[in-house]
Image (tube, coloured by chain):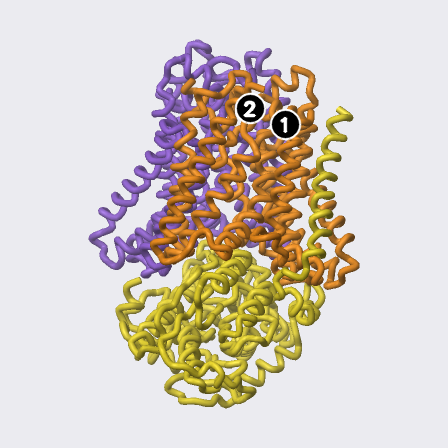
Chain colours: A purple, B yellow, C orange
Amino acid sequence: MSTTSITTTETPARPALPVHEGSLGSRIASGMATPGGAVFVLVGVLLVAIMVSNPNFTDPGALIRFAGRTAPIAIAAMGQYYVIVSGEFDLSMGAVIAAQVVLAGNFIGQDEGRIIPGLLLMLAVGALIGIVNGLVTTLLKVPSFIVTLGMMLALSGLVRYITGGAASGNPVDAFRDIGRGGIEDVPVVDIIPFPLIILAVVAVLSVWLMRRPFGRTLIAAGDNPQSMHYSGAPLWSYKTRAFVLSSLSATVAGILLVGYAGVHPSVGAGYEFTAITAVVLGGVVLGGGRGWVLSAAAGAFALELLFTLLTSLGVTSTWRDTVQGLIIIAAVALSARAWQVGRRPRRTTSSDPSPSTDNTATPSPNQPSTGATTGDN
Amino acid sequence: MRRTIRGTLASTSAALVVLAVLAGCSTDVEEPADSAAESTSESTEEADSGDEGEWFVQADYDEQDEQRSATFEGPESEPWLQYIDGEMTDTSEYNSGGAKKVCFANASVSNPWRQTGFITMNQQLEALQDKGVISEMEVRDAQDDDNTQLADIDYFISEGNCDAFVISPNSTAAMTPGVERACETGKPVIVFDRGVETDCATTFIHPIGGYAWGIDTAEFLVDNLEEGDKVVALRILPGVDVLETRWAAAEKIFEENGIEAEDFFTGADPTEIKKIITDALNQGEVAGVWMDAGDGAVAAIEAFEDAGVDYPVMTGEDEMSFLRKWEETGLNGLAPVYSNFQWRTPLLAVEKIFAGEEVPKEWVLPQTPITEDERAEYLEANEGMPDGHYAKFGGEDLPGFPEAWQDR
Amino acid sequence: MKARLSTVTSTTIVYGVLLVAVVAGAILTAVNGRNFFSVGNIDNILTTTSILGFIAIGQTLVVLGGSLDLSVPFVVSLSSVVGGGIMAGQSGNIGLAVVVTLALAMVVGLANGLIVTFLRVHGFIATLGTGLVISGYLASNYKGSHGSAPLDFRLLDATRIGPVPMSTLIMLGCAGVAVLMLRRTRLGHHLYAVGGNAEVARLSGLRTSVPLIAAHVICSALAAVAGLLLLARLSVGNPTIGSQGGYDLMSIAAVVLGGTLLAGGKGNITGTLAGVAIFAVIDNVMGVMQVNPFLRDVVRGVVIVVAVAVYARRELDTRPPRFERPTGLDAALQEAR
């Protein structure tokens, strides 16, 4: 974590900020007041609600399994975060997942020797899709909504065409273990699912990445592309990298999902909308420029907890969409308000935007106050 | 600002006026209009599908319940030609020689069941082309959209030069006008899989139906479970009548027998299925799993494995993935069948019709679940087939077997 | 009015693309031994155009205002079942059914507009949310088809004036009204202004919420008209008919294909109509050629991207500076200026 504090202090706008300003408690509290922090509170509230409605959920084993199965969507949400924060959309995520799942089934099959080549191939395909999305968006100037919509149609069509729409069968169990297995016989929690470990790694990498110049530039790009242009940064390269990160996240999610659920062309269906919703729920503003990467993951957890809560409350299956719709609107409306309220004091009081280095609640290094205060001109 | 609002109102009401005027003028041109609209006026009465919120027709339920034990006419080795004795359509007017052109309006090939069936149909086509019965089959695929399928049928009528129409409707009531327009051409019309609300078709081919599926599966679960046991019902999506009837019948039987069934929509996505089962297991014991289609059944079984609990009593479908997993785990299960071999029957019906042989007005094909005793036999017969293949596809004697089904 | 000058050029390109599609379509159809311009084929193109056309017109207004509407498929389905339910096969109920359905849809549109403007929720999330709300309602209350359209109402679909279906004429009528609204009314001008730059519009004294709410209301109303036409066409209400058509993403694609900026503030209805027609022609030709249904999606996806790429670059040069938008989806466009 020491490297991160160095990069933080390098920002010329804010020289030598104290690492510990105010007590830890007050910093967490101020972080919670922003939408990116509030989503952690929301996760807590939902968790308690589920535990009350279904006492079986208090079992640590059940909790950790839940966390494990939420990992793919959380990873996808973090990938979507890069794209959204830079002011774009990635609608191709679900199709990328489906393509990777089918690829895993067909390429790896029952041959353990092909696991490593298979993984490399999947990552290469994922990166290639991201590069295409990114370059067409930035160099050909096609809106990302259209680029990734086109990619979604083309990719899902292609996958179904090549496979004749039928899955050949699941890949070998050793490969599926990445998404299905875990470290067993752990005290208290019984099992630590591999997806959860991968999620943790991805999360740490993401936080690190967002504190590097790359992350800051990306946010600035979403916040005010005009000033980015004047600053001479190669925006196309930053945005293309964001798309690559998004597709790679989808690929990792696909690897986990093929383990968790098996091969089926409908795996990943609707993931783009779920991921975007999770990102927005995490307080990341559509259109770019605001939000934390960990809040996106928390948003994914909040969404999954919400679905689980609806199940455990016995809400009729047909009404679940309705409840989900209402809650999403309400949560985003509240966070929109919170951003507005939360912004003003930051400009006047200098204590608030402390880019603290504690990674539990990580308040605000990625907030728009970085660089020039150009929120909405 | 007030002007702006008035502007809105003005433009909206202008749109309404345009609509009203145009709607009004249509009555003046009633004569040259498609005559289809007139002939369907009686059938719209029947189209009322009962009260909203309820999808259960006792008469249909009873009929299908009886048909489960009916005797089928025709050779047992060719179930795709079997039918329940009933009204026959006289087709002597179509008796003519030469290869015919068939036009097939398909609802979609968007799931493994339809893909398997479509392959079987194409292989059947090849056999009949070799015999000189059919010259070609033009296919339009509606990609699961009623509106597109209506346009497809209209296109065939005006541009297709078709000798016969084969229609696999995307939905029952909505496709009725299209089928009626096809009937008005005077050419043979063959409807299969989902039905329509008109009996103008030369023959309507279908397995017994959704209620029978529901009865077979629910009775199996009731027989193998205790009163008060919990069953998770996995359904693909709401609002599709062929699936709603399966659940309607099963739900009724579960209720009558004190089985606690809770239903969920999965979109056939194995991820969703696994989550749902895991959550349900978290809530308490799950004794049975019911599915309205077997796609994704493996994920449901794996959820039990991952939770480390006993396998449930379960009904899936005759999809290979389920049959294989069923055998591997040894769970107590049943594979209901929505006979995939029905995809052969329409083209064979074309052959009969142009030979002037009579065909059943409503061609009810057998629909028998695969039990544990029969499982090994079907697994062996379909060895080498992909997971998305259906055991009762009935194409073993067709050209291209087995490669056509294996290499998709 | 500088804006109009520049839109002429982009719309010209769109119609150029349409012309290319038609010529290519005619050749490919002829190769398959058919006539592209036969009555049956034109009829097929027009009927498949009109439903998406209504929705795309409404979507254009919403996109021009800088928002999105993802709830349209569910409004279409809702209108179809509610309209069918009220009509219940009786001619006397048609008027009531049309009024109630349109009113209901406008309430949905109003809700969308209020959530976007006053609760400051991005249109993507707001309409995704309202769409989910409606979809839950539909799933809970309608199992399979519902209600039925009386013969008189079904004439809406069955009637042809010459080779042109009634539904297409109504769609073109609505398009004409929408064009007039955008060009001649203050509401239309304000919509461009708000979509171009809400902040500038606000500073110059506009109530920025009004045009956007109006756009959402009109969009939902047009989706309801599409739902009613589907009711006339199918003869029954269908709770999944909107989702079947995939009208949410396809309408947005048609709007962008028609040269409207996704970020808002620039574009027009005539371009959108061409966008819808391009889709219809491509679908029609692929139908005639019996292209594998999965490959069709591939072609659609590629066409959307390539077609937009053809003129996306060009728009950069002609875009008037006062319609800049500091943040948003076309951030890349800004960057290159």
Q: Whole-percent x and y of residue C161?
A: 62, 52
Confirm or deny contact between disc 2 and disc 1 (CB under 8 A): yes
Q: Whole-percent x and y of residue C190?
A: 65, 24
Q: Tell me which amino acid carries mark 2.
A: Arg
- Cα separation, mark 2 vs mark 1, equals 9 Å
Q: How many marks?
A: 2
State the residue at coordinates (66%, 48%): C225
Q: Quadrant of residue A209?
A: top left
Please, is residue A125 above or below residue B235 in the view?
Answer: above
State the residue at coordinates (66%, 36%): C177
Mark 2 is surrounded, within 10 Å at the Cα level, by few (under 14), some (14 to 19) or many (20 or more) other residues, namely: few
Q: Secondary structure at mark 1?
A: helix
Specify which label sits upstream in the sequence, 2 or 1. 2
Which disc is residue A308 wearing?
none
Instruction: Quickly name the residue at label 1.
Output: C183
Instruction: Quickly name the residue at label 2.
Output: C4
Q: In the image shown, does C127 or C246 lie closer to the viewer?
A: C246
